Amino acid sequence: MRKPFAIKAEVRDPRAKTFDFVAQKTMYGGRHVAAGDVIYVFASENEGGQGLVARGIVTASAPVARKPGLARQTPRVSLSIRRTALARRPLGRRELKPLAGGADGDPGAELGFRFYRQATDKVIGLSQAAADFLDTFFRRA
């Protein structure tokens, strides 16, 4: 089974059928994202977005070459994503904040920690529990 991923980045059109992201920072295993992986798209609140907007499939993934002469560099990746579903309920910083103190293994606490402890935009790897939690935002309530 493939590992699920999420990206928090500027999303100009949350209803777009495809998304392209260039040179995105990676953390928590995000550099391993590959074509065919499931990815959850969060419109970055840093850029005026509202959090979770879509689920998709990575159609292309390419690592970005490191800049010569810099000792410490966060790995970066460029992605193309085909949207497979739109979120039906909101999930952003406001909704995740109350879950931040949750126990280890709590999907809401995992998302809050990985996305908002360091609020930069990024691609992250997810646990299957976090992916299952996110999938509930794509079903009718």
Image (tube, rainbow, N blue to C red):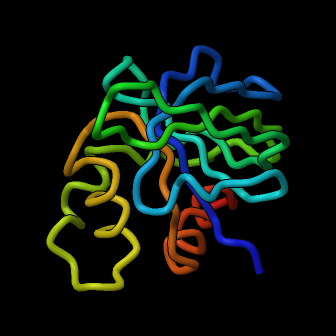
Q: Residue at x 59, y 74 (%)?
A: 132
Q: Residue at x 77, y 81 (%)?
A: 1
115 lies above or below 109 = above
Report the quarter where the C terminus lies.
bottom right
Extreme residue in the top direction: 12
The one nearer the camera, 132 or 63, is 63
97 lies above or below 44 = below
From the viewer's perspective, tell me whether residue 120 is left or right of residue 18.
left
Extreme residue in the bottom direction: 104
Extreme residue in the front direction: 69
Residue 121 locus on image (x, y percent): 39, 34
The one nearer the camera, 74 or 119, is 74
106 lies above or below 134 = below
Residue 46, quarter of the rendered image = top left
Residue 42 locus on image (x, y percent): 51, 39
Residue 33 locus on image (x, y percent): 66, 54
- The number of callouts visible is 0
Residue 31 locus on image (x, y percent): 55, 52
Extreme residue in the left direction: 101
Q: Residue at x 74, y 41 (%)?
A: 61
Residue 13, quarter of the rendered image = top right
Residue 100, quarter of the rendered image = bottom left
